[in-house]
Image (cartoon, helix red, strand yellow):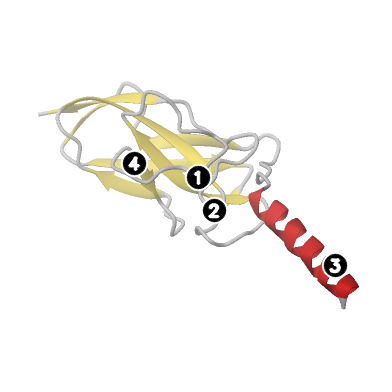
Amino acid sequence: MRILLVVLMGLASLSATAQTAPTPAPEGARLYFISPKDGETVRGEVKVRFGLSGMGVAPAGVAVEGTGHHHLLIDVEELPPLDRPIPADEHHVHFGKGQTETVLRLAPGRHTLQLLLGDHLHRPHQPPVISERITIEVAE
């Protein structure tokens, strides 16, 4: 009985370690904006389309190797910690259903957008899969 308990405790420890280990990103994975383009001036609602190559898209909570889901960083100066789940707020928008586009309503003025791919637990992959930060101008 004691040996069984030790084995079960060991398996629980391995399971916890596997759940906290970073999710690897395939070499060459790339995240980018299809639209809008960097420097573009837009009016009204902004249709944002996400591009991803070298990986697939899967909803949050679905652990499939080589996949993730999009997070849109709006007007974020610094990336969130890359060793923890990506926050969810008005500046860190989650697309956990596997969406690949959205429509934003942004105030007139200059805005930055950046994409960060998250794994099934909303954590950045290792190495992180991040787009370039783009700047758009929303005209009145």
> Which numbered disc flags the more N-terminal residue, 3 or 2?
3
- Residue sitting at x 68%, y 43%: 24
Distance in Å between CA atoms under marks 1 and 3: 30 Å
Q: Which residue is mark 1?
A: 85
Residue type, numbered disc 1 = Pro
> Which numbered disc flags the more N-terminal residue, 1 or 4?
4
Which mark's residue is nearer the viewer, 1 or 3? Answer: 3
Distance in Å between CA atoms under marks 1 and 4: 23 Å
- Residue sitting at x 68%, y 57%: 16
Q: Observer-nearest residue: 11 or 46?
A: 11
Distance in Å between CA atoms under marks 4 and 2: 23 Å
- Residue sitting at x 50%, y 33%: 81
Q: Which residue is mark 2?
A: 121
Q: What number is the disc on residue 106?
A: none
Q: Observer-nearest residue: 72 or 138?
A: 72
Q: Bin the neighbour count of mark 3 within 10 Å (Cα to Cα): few under 14, some 14-19, many 20 and up.
A: few
Tags 4 and 2 in contact by the CB under 8 Å rule?
no
Tags 1 and 2 in contact by the CB under 8 Å rule?
yes
Instruction: Give the quarter of the image for residue 114.
Output: top left
> Which numbered disc flags the more N-terminal residue, 1 or 3?
3
Q: Which residue is mark 3?
A: 7
Q: Secondary structure at mark 2?
A: loop
Q: Is residue 76 above or below residue 45?
A: above
Q: Bin the neighbour count of mark 1 within 10 Å (Cα to Cα): few under 14, some 14-19, many 20 and up.
A: some
> Which numbered disc flags the more N-terminal residue, 4 or 2?
4
